[in-house]
């Protein structure tokens, strides 16, 4: 019981710290980041919020292998809402702007990462069930 509580506290703290880091970067006036390829900004948004959604999912669950659809829904709602909030917030920051493209990139990152976690965990669970079934036959 103490181990689960310690893990939950750790992931909640990690999520809060990650949220603060995103907020700090969203609060800074745009600095000239070198563009290595077209759409780099959207890829960064996609990955940043995909990781955010994963951290939400882990923080919300008691056991990562026993996630319920409700956990995915909460992680989706919380992550997309935070992305939208950050874009609205940036509207009021000098040299920053509100961008529907960024909201789309954030949301696609969230959805993609949650789907990947779901697929990975169900494949792992299914493989574990098949192994148990094969052991029972022998």
Image (tube, grey):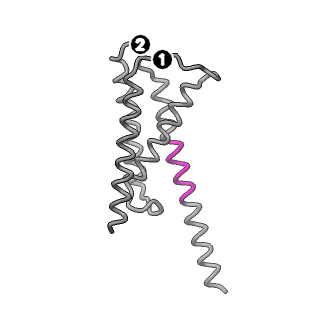
Crowd class of label 1 (few under 14; some 14 to 19; many from 20; radius 10 Å)? few
Residue lying at 36% horizontally and 35% vertically, measured from the top left: 20
Q: Element under label 2?
A: loop
* 135 relative to 66 in the view: left or right: right
Residue lying at 37% horizontally and 30% vertically, measured from the top left: 23
Q: Position of residue 105 (x, y in %)?
A: 51, 31
Check if residue 2 falls in the magenta segment.
no
- Above or below residue 66? Residue 130 is below
Residue lying at 36% horizontally and 56% vertically, measured from the top left: 8
Residue at image mark 1: 31
Q: Element under label 1?
A: loop
Q: Residue furthest top?
A: 95
Check if residue 119 falls in the magenta segment.
yes
Q: Position of residue 56 (x, y in %)?
A: 40, 47
Q: Residue furthest bottom?
A: 138
Q: Position of residue 7 (x, y in %)?
A: 38, 58
Residue at image mark 2: 95
- Above or below residue 97? Residue 113 is below
The quarter of the rendered structure image containing the C terminus is bottom right
Residue closer to the observer: 63 or 32 = 32
Which residues, given as a range, are shown in magenta?
Answer: 111-121
């Amino acid at each position: 019981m103490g181990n689960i509580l310690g893990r939950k506290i750790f992931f909640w703290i990690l999520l809060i710290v990650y949220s603060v880091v995103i907020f700090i970067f969203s609060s800074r006036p745009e600095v000239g980041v070198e563009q290595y390829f077209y759409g780099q900004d959207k890829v960064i948004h996609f990955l940043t919020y995909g990781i955010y959604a994963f951290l939400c999912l882990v923080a919300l669950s008691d056991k990562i292998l026993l996630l319920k659809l409700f956990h995915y829904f909460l992680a989706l709602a919380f992550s997309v809402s935070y992305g939208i909030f950050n874009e609205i917030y940036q509207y009021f920051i000098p040299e920053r702007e509100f961008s529907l493209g960024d909201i789309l990139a954030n949301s696609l990152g969230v959805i993609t990462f949650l789907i990947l976690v779901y697929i990975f965990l169900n494949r792992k669970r299914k493989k574990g069930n098949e192994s148990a079934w094969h052991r029972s036959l022998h």
